[in-house]
Amino acid sequence: MNTPKELLERNFPTADQDARSARRPSLYAGEDSSYELAFTDNDFLLRPELRPVRMQLELLKPEMVQREENIESTIVVFGSARILSAEQALLKQQEAEDLPSGPAREHALRTARRHVDMARFYEEARAFSSLVTEHSARLATPIYVVTGGGPGVMEAGNRGAFEVGGKSLGLNIVLPHEQEPNPYITPRLCFQFHYFALRKMHFLMRSIALVCFPGGFGTLDELFETLTLIQTGKCRKRPVLLFGREFWTKLINFDHLVDTGMISPEDLDLFRFVETADEAWETLQQVYGLGQTGASESASGW
């Protein structure tokens, strides 16, 4: 016997249905009224006392969307927002060369040449993301690139996936100065965060590896939080690849940290230096034995 349809209907209206019903004009609507539904009242939701609720929502929204999109494994690409593509860097150099002689031209040329030199990291991030996206598409569990969603190396990471027809994620953050998402992120997977801590948590939750290109304070913050969590056993071990040995060893004297006892010698094994996209992808293949079954659950080689 078929179950009567009435027995399967909801007992109560959905929140969406009640929210729509509550939009009708009311005697108690207005600035001084508390009549609006709590979950549609922005003034209420933005009160300091509601911070725990907002943090929970910021955890839940990206988590739920990623589950719905079957995102299980990611590779995080960190790096500076200030690194330009080779094309942009060469254009800036040409503009500097066209300036009239003088101190302003010399300064512009020095800056432009630095951009040209650093642009290789943009192109390597772009190539690496394409490699990950193309090769992992054949795995039972695809691997998706996730970035901070902004310009520079972040743009390169999303762009590489986009150019081979793949999806990628962008985790943007609201900053005092304007930051727009780059145009290469899969729209359904482009998120915006208020809390840095929850954004960094989402970077790590599904990651099987982290690839870190040269960057400033933000990149260093993300890198060292990751290394700290791995070092202390608060998250499982996973590959951390630093692009550009010369940059990183000039910036951070890792040996000095060991010599002064600030870290243990084995802590240097928490990361590896790589120079090219091919080397980075080959390293991950070796660590995980990437095959038709997807990435393994533990980075046993690390």
Image: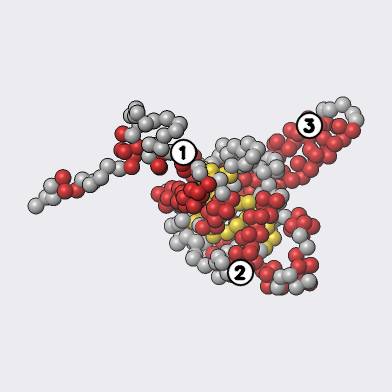
Where's residue 258, x and y in %? 75, 71
Where's residue 132, x and y in %? 55, 52
Give the numbered dot on residue 94: 3
Q: Nearer the viewer, mark 2 or mark 3?
A: 2
Q: Which of 57 and 74 is in front in this view?
A: 57
Q: Give amino acid for label 3.
A: Gln
User: In the structure shown, which secondary structural element does the residue marked by tag 2 occupy?
Assistant: loop
Q: Which of marks 2 and 3 is nearer the N terminus?
A: 3
Position of residue 73 in the picture relative to residue 269 (left or right): left
Identify the residue at horizontal 64%, vertical 48% (top origin): 125
The image quarter in which residue 84 lies: top right
Is residue 80 at all visible to an observer of this figure? yes
The image quarter in which residue 275 lies: bottom right
Is 186 situated above or below 276?
A: above
Q: Mark 2 points at which residue?
A: 232
Identify the residue at horizontal 11%, vertical 50% (top origin): 2
Give the numbered dot on residue 104: none
